[in-house]
Image: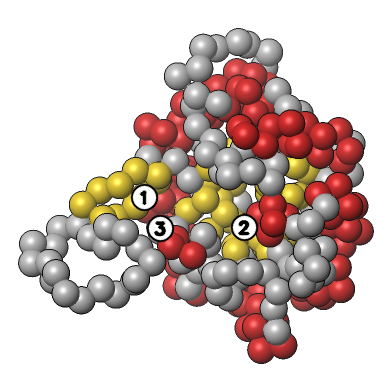
Amino acid sequence: MQIEICCYSLTDCHTAEQAGADRIELCGGLSDGGLTPSAGLIQLVKEQVGIPVWVMIRPRGGDFVYDDAEVAVMEADIDMARQLGADGLVLGCLQPDGSVDEPLTLRLINRGQGLPVTFHRAFDVCRDPLSALEAIIRTGAVRILTSGQQPNAPAGAALLQTLAQQAAGRIQIMAGAGVNAQNAQQLAQTGVDALHLSGQQTTHSPMQYRSEVVRMASAVQGEYDRHGASLQKIRPVVELVRAHTNGVNLPNH
């Protein structure tokens, strides 16, 4: 059982490592649910952080059906991530009918030249999760990140258990969305291989002057709030999962 932390900054990555996480999913674009991070961020994280770093490959927010121009960008981003030392890639592609786009997913996996790949939560908006599981296994991806096709992983626990059973060790199932110290043990008992969380806390911007008229990101509430990983939220999850793995029952925090 491993713990992966979704990180959006160099500071987040340091926090994840300090908290005892096993792996980082490195992203940009928090308000879009995770986009490809900048080359500078990848470079500095790889220079300063000792745990594996898996890089998100996603050119925009919204759906997961990509045109030729977007695929070209994804391929260039895969090349960049590989050259900067990424330990793995995170991506996902769907067909308009809600099925997994196997040819494109395989094409992008091959572009990584051996880097392992997690198929991200595009899985949670596919039409048939059990068929999608088999399709993703055929592409050679090593892991699926999923909330069990629900808004959060605890609500999707039943499907997570079914997926873990059907996967039967052929691919890892990683539960993500809404994971915290209150539900980590419950999710570990579904049989998934890993838990994924951001463990975020909100702090206020140091800006004293604040425009009441101009907004830079129309989809973001609280534009003068900052979001970052919290050691106090991540470490208890790590401790609970370690205890579960070792057969020790701890009370939920």
- Residue 105: in sight, yes or no? no
Q: Residue at position x 80%, y 68% from top?
A: 97
Question: Which residue carries the number 2 mark?
Answer: 54
- Residue 221: in sight, yes or no? yes
Q: Which one is in front, 62 or 68? A: 62
Look at the image and tell me in which quarter the C terminus lies.
top left
Q: Residue at position x 8%, y 62% from top?
A: 208
Measured as percent of width and height from the top left, residue 11 is found at 37, 53
Question: Which residue carries the number 1 mark?
Answer: 228
Q: Is residue 240 above or below residue 98?
A: above
Q: Is residue 241 above or below residue 7?
A: above
Q: Which one is in front, 197 or 131? A: 131
- Give left or right: position of 101 versus 174: right
**Foreground label between 2 and 1:** 1
Disc 2 is placed on an element classified as strand
First in sequence: mark 2 vs mark 1? 2
Kind of residue at disc 1: Gly
**Foreground label between 3 and 1:** 1
For the residue carrying disc 2, how many other residues have a C-alpha within 10 Å: few (<14), some (14-19), or many (20+)?
A: many
Disc 1 is placed on an element classified as strand
- Give left or right: position of 85 versus 71: left
- Give left or right: position of 119 versus 85: right
Q: Is residue 68 above or below residue 26?
A: below
Q: Residue reaching furthest bottom?
A: 69
